[in-house]
Image (cartoon, rainbow, N blue to C red):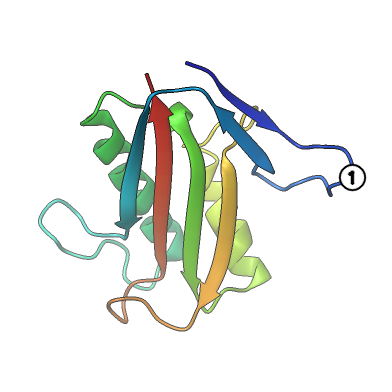
Amino acid sequence: MSNQFSNPPGLAVPNGFSHVARTTGRTTLSVSGQVAYDSEGGIVGVGDLAAQTDQVYRNIQTALAAHGATMNDIVKTTLFVRDLSPDKAVVIRRVRAAYISSDKPPASTMVGVSSLAKPELLLEVEATAVID
């Protein structure tokens, strides 16, 4: 299997993601949008975007591990951020850096939304990973 990440000439240099992810793997894992729920369903970090971001990425890590995958197998993420602002993007990128490879980051989209499933939730992240 090979996951390759590139930033083709003619596109702006990305900040913490790759423009293109190419894979030849055979198994695709689609992880539903993860929010800051702990294993009991409680919301972690109410009002704290950094704490919620950390929990979201730990949840993604747990979901992938259950199928023999790691965070390095992620080829695409989509982030839904309540009331997105440049300052919030900085917080998310800082926390996400502990989970996502800076050398080969996945393709990614960050979208601002007005609300999520519960008012206390600040972030939801979907992930796609490809493994052999």
**Mark 1, secondary structure of its residue:** loop
Q: Nearer the viewer, residue 114 or 19?
A: 19
Q: Nearer the viewer, residue 8 or 87?
A: 8
123, above or below 84, in the image: above
> Residue at 45% across / 58% down in the picture?
50
- Does the rendering let one see residue 82? yes
The residue at which mark 1 appears reads as 10
Q: Residue furthest right?
A: 10
Residue type for callout 1: Gly
Whether residue 42 sits left or right of residue 14 in the image: it is: left
- Residue 84 picture location, percent across and down: 57, 74
- Residue 114 picture location, percent across and down: 47, 83
Q: Nearer the viewer, residue 100 or 1?
A: 1
- Does the rendering let one see residue 18? no
> Residue at 32% across / 64% down in the picture?
45
> Residue at 37% across / 59% down in the picture?
52
- Residue 14 picture location, percent across and down: 75, 47
5, above or below 125, in the image: above
Whether residue 80 sits left or right of residue 58 in the image: it is: right
The answer to which quarter of the image holds residue 61 is: top left
Classed neighbour count for the residue bearing mark 1: other residues with Cα under 10 Å, few (<14), some (14–19), many (≥20): few
The answer to which quarter of the image holds residue 21 is: top right
- Residue 48 picture location, percent across and down: 41, 67
Q: Residue furthest top?
A: 1
